[in-house]
Image (spheres, rainbow, N blue to C red):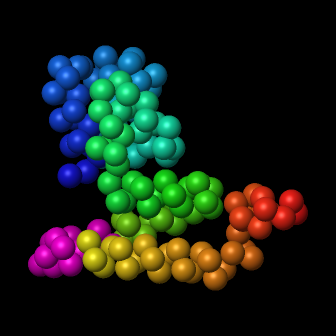
Amino acid sequence: MKLGEKLRNARLAKHLSQSALAEASGLSLRTIQNYELGVRMPKKRDTYTRLAEALGIDEKVLLDDTADFVLRASEQYGSRGAKQAWDLVADFRGLCAGGEVPEEDMDTIMQALQEAYWDAKKRNRRFVNRRYRDDAQEGGE
């Protein structure tokens, strides 16, 4: 289940309107609508926390592998990493659209793609902005 469905189901289970959830979470109504429609995803983990707290649920309920992957890429490599991660996921979904690949096989393929992404980032870290590199924080560069 995707974030939009999870968010909508949790909101309805709490008998909240989109406006009430927006107010309780400190987000705009339009943002809540976009999340539920699947038009956008939160860019920061804090947003998941705020939504979960407003709904009285654990934020892990809202997170899925895709969201976690994109958020980790954002935390480690900034907005460019998040965009690359999101593009990878979107391209993969596009390849699978209308196909007959079983869901468990798609999950395995997506995990392999994510691992390939992390490996490539590790190998190419010299091209990563210094503020996102581990050695810049550790070595005080």
User: Does residue 92 appear to the left or right of 74 in the view shown?
Assistant: left
**Could you tell me residue 96's position as x and y percent?**
23, 74
Query: Which image quadrant: the C terminus?
Result: bottom right
Residue 74 lies, with reference to residue 139, above or below; the image says above
> Depth check: 92 or 60 in front?
60
Residue 7 location (% of width, % of height): 26, 37
Tag count:
0
The answer to whether residue 92 is seen in the rendering is yes
Residue 82 visible, this orientation: no
- Say which residue appears at 29% left-offset and 68% top-offset: 93
Residue 83 on the magenta segment: no
Classify 60 as above or below 108: above
Quadrant position of residue 62 = top left
Name the residue: 31% across, 17% down.
20
**Residue projecting furthest to the right:** 141
Residue at position x 28%, y 77% in the image: 108
Residue 131, image x, y percentages: 75, 58
Q: In the rendered image, which quarter is residue 15 located in?
A: top left
Which stretch appears magenta? 92-106
Residue in the foreground of this view, choosing between 40 and 121: 121
**Most prominent secondary structure in the magenta stretch?**
helix
Q: Is residue 22 left or right of residue 98?
A: right
Direction from residue 87 to residue 77 in the image, left or right: right
Q: Nearer the viewer, residue 64 or 33?
A: 64
Q: Is residue 32 above or below residue 139?
A: above
Residue displayed at 58% across by 54% down:
75
Place residue 110 in its image quadrant: bottom left
Can you give x and y, in whole percent of width and height, for residue 47 in the image?
46, 36
